[in-house]
Amino acid sequence: MAPDTILQVTNLVKDFNGIRAVNDVSFTLPTNTITAVIGPNGAGKTTLYNLISGQLSPTFGSIKLKGKEIAGLPPDKIVKAGIGRSFQITSVFPSLTVLQNIRAAVISRMGRQFDLWQGVEWDSLEDNSPANPLQQAIHKTLALVGIEHLATNIVSTLSHGDQALVEMAIVLALEPHLILLDEPTAGMSREETRHMVELIRHVQQQTGCTFLITEHDMEVVFQLAEKIVVMHQGAILATGNHEEIRNNISVRRAYLGTDD
């Protein structure tokens, strides 16, 4: 694996009762880049994500993160290895505050036993001393995503767009090297979509994280992705930059059923 490659997927296969959902998929992700995986519904994108994040074990093939094999590891081991994932349906604690959600993720990363309700001082951003690394990490994450003003809000009271920001903050609190985003702008207004695109760029620039995204909004894909991988019927149909994918006849056929 090249030193500037963070993820290498080789000959990846996943079968379900004789049905091949992922068929001999191979690609690499350069470090500190944004790559998009796109394709029609049923192309195998979600299965691919589940394989990389440990939700599923491959039938065959290799997944290496920074040169170390992670294929078949459980999700918690893969998170500790440095992969974070957000889902199309936000996975947050809706009855807790934003700060409590972030705190849970930070403590999980630190490996400390915790009680979400313990200690009133943990529900405040006032103690930011170097002697309080937990609070420092929470404050840093809130600031990175720009949601300090939402810290004391109950997550269930937030808009869909703000809940997506909270989920992004939870992922970032785990300090991953690679972040998988599943439809990060799904259900968002135009303004929320614009803000999410800007946030992804900002986070990449500030942290050096590598992003792998799936997204149906092609405008978002073309704005963000330096490299685009197109899947169709479980296999990779094409790989390239914006213009190469725009002008690829096979991609047009797969999406539209036409060469036009």
Image: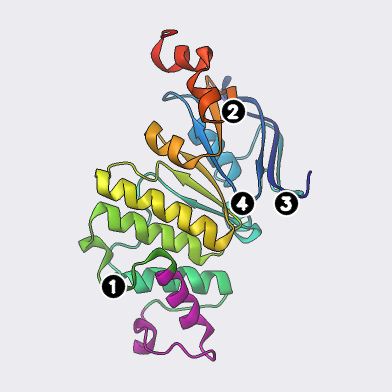
Identify which residue, 34 or 236, lies in the foreground.
34
Vertical placement of 52 versus 150: above or below? above
Identify which residue, 220 or 233, lies in the foreground.
220
Q: Earlier in the sequence, mark 3 or mark 2?
A: 3
Q: Position of residue 116 (x, y in %)?
A: 39, 76
Was residue 70 drawn as part of the magenta stretch in this picture?
no
Q: Position of residue 4 (x, y in %)?
A: 73, 49
Specify the amino acid type for callout 2.
Gly
Would you say the residues marked 2 and 1 are in contact, meaning their CB atoms lie under 8 Å apart?
no
User: How many residues crowd mark 2 within 10 Å: few (<14), some (14–19), many (20+)?
Assistant: some
Residue 88 appears anywhere in the view: yes
User: How many residues crowd mark 1 within 10 Å: few (<14), some (14–19), many (20+)?
Assistant: few
Badge number at residue 240: 2
Specify the amino acid type for callout 1.
His
Residue 231 appears anywhere in the view: no
Q: Position of residue 186 (x, y in %)?
A: 33, 41
Q: Which residues are magenta?
A: 117-143
Specify the amino acid type for callout 4.
Asn
Image position of 137 (left or right of 235):
left
Identify which residue, 136 or 60, lies in the foreground.
136
Image position of 19 (left or right of 81):
left
Mark 4 secondary-structure assignment:
loop
Badge number at residue 247: none
Of the two numbered discs 4 and 3 in the rendering, the one whose residue sits closer to the viewer: 4
Badge number at residue 149: 1
Of the two numbered discs 2 and 1 in the rendering, the one whose residue sits closer to the viewer: 2
Would you say the residues marked 3 and 2 are in contact, meaning their CB atoms lie under 8 Å apart?
no
Badge number at residue 32: 4
Q: Earlier in the sequence, mark 4 or mark 3?
A: 4
Of the two numbered discs 1 and 3 in the rendering, the one whose residue sits closer to the viewer: 1
Spatial separation of the CA atoms under disc 4 and disc 3: 13 Å
